[in-house]
Image: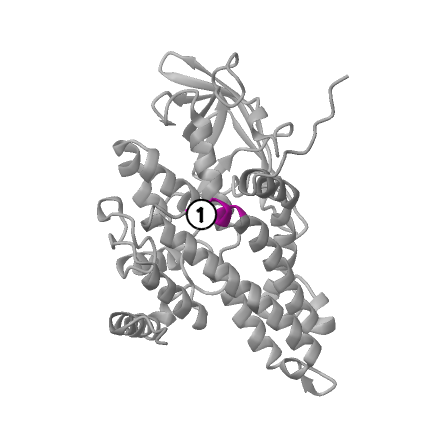
Amino acid sequence: MDLSFGSEYTIFREEVQDFIENNKEKQPSRGATGGKEALAWQKILIENGFHSRTIPKEYGGYGAEPDIIKSRIISEEFSKAQLNTGMGGQGISMLTPVLLEMGTEEQKQQFVKATIQGELVWCQGYSEPGAGSDLASLSTKAVLDGDDWVINGQKIWTSTAHLADWIFCLVRTEPDAPKHQGISFLLFRMDTPGIEIRPLVDMTGAANFNEVFFTDVRVPKDQIVGQRGQGWSVANAILGHERGSLAPPDAAQSRLNGIIRLMQTETIGGEKLIDNAIFRDRLMKIQGRVLALSFNDMRLLSARINKTQDTKLAGMIVKLTGTELRHELEALAIDVMGEIGLSYGDNPYTRGNGSWQYSYMFYLGLIIGGGTSQIQKNIISERGLDMPKEPKVAAK
């Protein structure tokens, strides 16, 4: 049985390897998420087809035809080389594909290129203090006044709001409509008068989240995606991309490779951890789950081309399995390091600049954020497996 991809893909893999060898010194330093070096690296990746590969050239992408095998080869080689895969985030991973599908031509021209090249940073205005898991209960309102929407209300857990240039935001524009039908999807600048941002420090010690307050914020009426009052369909499309981007298998594979290297150098009682049966067993179990996540990802990629495939359930499991896997993966690395695994911050003994400890806590948060694991299990059981909904307590 020949399981090779064929000569065309062998040549392509060699091209990817050549790119990595010739350009690896140009990647931004570890931990750099912005600035000139990150922007320059992003441009190099796009120009060579290793980022935004299938986004049309007229919108700033590389313009290649979808090819799941080439996408997999790129992921594999970048992971092996521990090469920076470029920028991600809410604008690139979530908003861009939805604008390409649902946005106007003017919106595509205005936002897509600048977003994928890292020139525009976005945040997501979804959750509110009284509307988290039940997002459709949101109460931030927008009233049309002449040529402007006037927005009043509050959002919470708004990632990167303190860094963002723009926000894509759900607001209630039809107060008398059923809650899922009275929502609109607006785009507006974060320096618009009337916006106040209050950082929220999480368990990593960083302010990754924010509260955002809107007081008479005026937004041009044409900065809406989709139809007025029909923003829930746009929101659901965004959520689909969000849940798939929170713990991608390529990143999990890269971190797994890092653990393997760590286990080849860390020792206990003079024995390398890679030779310790207990730790090696834990590693192999996680390795199997990473492979399963990767194969599921290939199924989803294939379905984008072959529209006849039913991947509803395959898509639903990604967020649940991916975030829990990443948390366990980072936990293994901490255990491998022993007492050094407890170090944090500017401790000189940390490995990998403390990224293992930071990611361990970050992914514990992501098990909750973007739809808790409990909510994800309900979605999988009710919508994916057609199991009966849990009974609701009758109101007194």
Q: Which residue is drawn at 40% across and 46% down?
A: 92
Instruction: Tell me if residue 123 comes above or below residue 309 in the rendering.
Output: above
Expressed as whole percent of the image width and height from the top left, the position of residue 77 reads 39, 70
Residue 370 seen in the current view: no
Q: What stretch is highlighted in magenta?
A: 310-316
- Please tell me how many numbered marks the rendered image carries: 1
Where is residue 36, by image quadrant? bottom left
Residue type of the residue flagged with mark 1:
Thr
Q: Mark 1 points at which residue?
A: 311
Expressed as whole percent of the image width and height from the top left, the position of residue 305 reads 32, 50
Q: Residue furthest right?
A: 396
Q: Dividing the image into 4 quarters, which one contains the N terminus?
A: bottom left
Is residue 163 located in the magenta-colored stretch of the structure?
A: no
Expressed as whole percent of the image width and height from the top left, the position of residue 270 reads 71, 88
Q: Dividing the image into 4 quarters, which one contains the C terminus?
A: top right
Q: Nearer the viewer, residue 189 or 52?
A: 52
Q: Residues within 10 Å of mark 1 (few under 14, many from 20)?
A: some
Label 1 residue SS:
loop
